[in-house]
Image: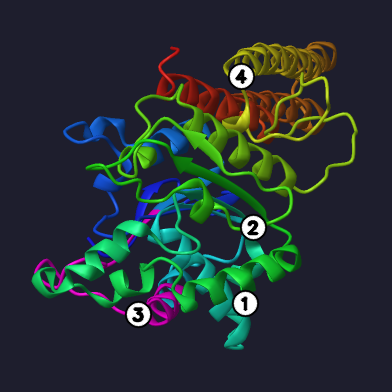
Amino acid sequence: MDGLQKISGCDRPDRVADVIFVHGLDGDARTTWHPQDHPEAFWPAWLGADVPAVGVWSLGYAVSASAWKGHTMPLVDRATNVLDLLELDGIGRRPIVFICHSLGGLLVKQMLRNAGDFGNPAWKAIATQTKAIVFLSTPHSGANLASWIQYIGGLLRTTVSVEELEAHHPRLRELNLWYRNHVADFDLTTVVYCEKRPVAGILVVNETTADPGIVGVIPIPVNEDHVSICKPASKDSQIYRRVRRLVEDIVDASRPPVTKQPVKNADVIFNDQSNQLKLLWQCTDDELFAEEEHRRGVLGKEKTRRNSVFIRFCLIAGSLVLFAVGWTYFRGAADLVSFLSGVAGIMLGLANLKAMEKPSPFEARQVAALEEINMILRERGVR
């Protein structure tokens, strides 16, 4: 399916960042990111579960190697098309991390260039908000396999995307020079992984072409081929762990600074030693249990306080009624004073009872927070 697919947390207005997966040649928004016949190992969903503060998306777009299989469009045009799609879904309002496989990395670089060159403020915001790009076997200077496919292209009817992927293609060289010279302007983190196992005897993207040539950025070889490098088998895989840590670091850096001060009566955790404000869903299980115990204690104290007030008012109401009875007894008859005192005592008692039936706004907040904590713990399967 083409377009920007919502994977996790994309409809949360309070999400801190957006993570976008971008597939490569002959890929799609789903199967690129999980091992064949194992859709349950779809790692964009893992990332959404492990880092709930982000929205996770997967981009789907038509990009076939052979015209027999489908159609495609030049890289520059596709980049413009995708920028429009991202803008329509509100991307660019918060930090962005791109996870790219193969040609997907070239597409993201072209998107950043178009965003800076075309003068569209919304597109420029997308470029400005891009904080990290992870390149998984992206051929920054072209792929040898693409050159081989071009050689027999008469039979395969290759598309423009394969032509642009040809090794040492001038267009790719020029795009990589632009990225290398402008990456510092964007102030983003670049992470590069490359394959070490061939596919059908061909190393599609070797360490040389996977290297974007940026100072301090080292292509990290992994024991995968061009197809499997974007399909981690488990959460313990090196690439998944690196991506998760990268996203967590960006989330932490993107949260606004909070002045340290004691926190009272807010829907945040009280007992965090850092005194940093936290929404309940951002707390660990242990923090939630501690917060639950704390709020139950606060709620108990509030009920004790309200009960003491209730008792005092009951004593006052009872005193007024007794005064009315005593006044009537000593006077030998009821008069206006005894009548008003008795009525006042009864009304005060009834008003006090009615006030005790309805919880105070403070109590209501504690009860609502306890219900939310219970719901979060149940969703996490720890209760």
Real-space CA distance between mark 1 and mark 4, rounded to the nearest whole angstrom? 40 Å
- Which residue does the numbered mark 4 point to in the structure image? 288
- Which residue does the numbered mark 3 point to in the structure image? 74
Which label sits in the foreground, 1 or 2? 2
Answer whether residue 60 is magenta in the image.
Answer: yes
- Which residue does the numbered mark 1 point to in the structure image? 124
Real-space CA distance between mark 1 and mark 2, rounded to the nearest whole angstrom? 24 Å
Q: How is the image coloured?
A: rainbow
**Quarter occupied by residue 252:** top right
Q: Give the camera-side residue of 320 and 198.
A: 198
Answer whether residue 34 is magenta in the image.
Answer: no
Which label sits in the foreground, 4 or 3? 3
- Which residue does the numbered mark 2 point to in the structure image? 213
Three-letter code, disc 4: Leu
The answer to whether 259 is drawn above or below residue 269 in the figure is: below
> Residue 235, percent across and down?
43, 25
Which label sits in the foreground, 1 or 4? 1
The answer to whether 202 is drawn above or below residue 61 in the figure is: above
Name the N-terminal-most of marks 1 and 3. Answer: 3
Q: Is residue 267 visible?
A: yes
Which label sits in the foreground, 1 or 3? 3
Three-letter code, disc 3: Pro
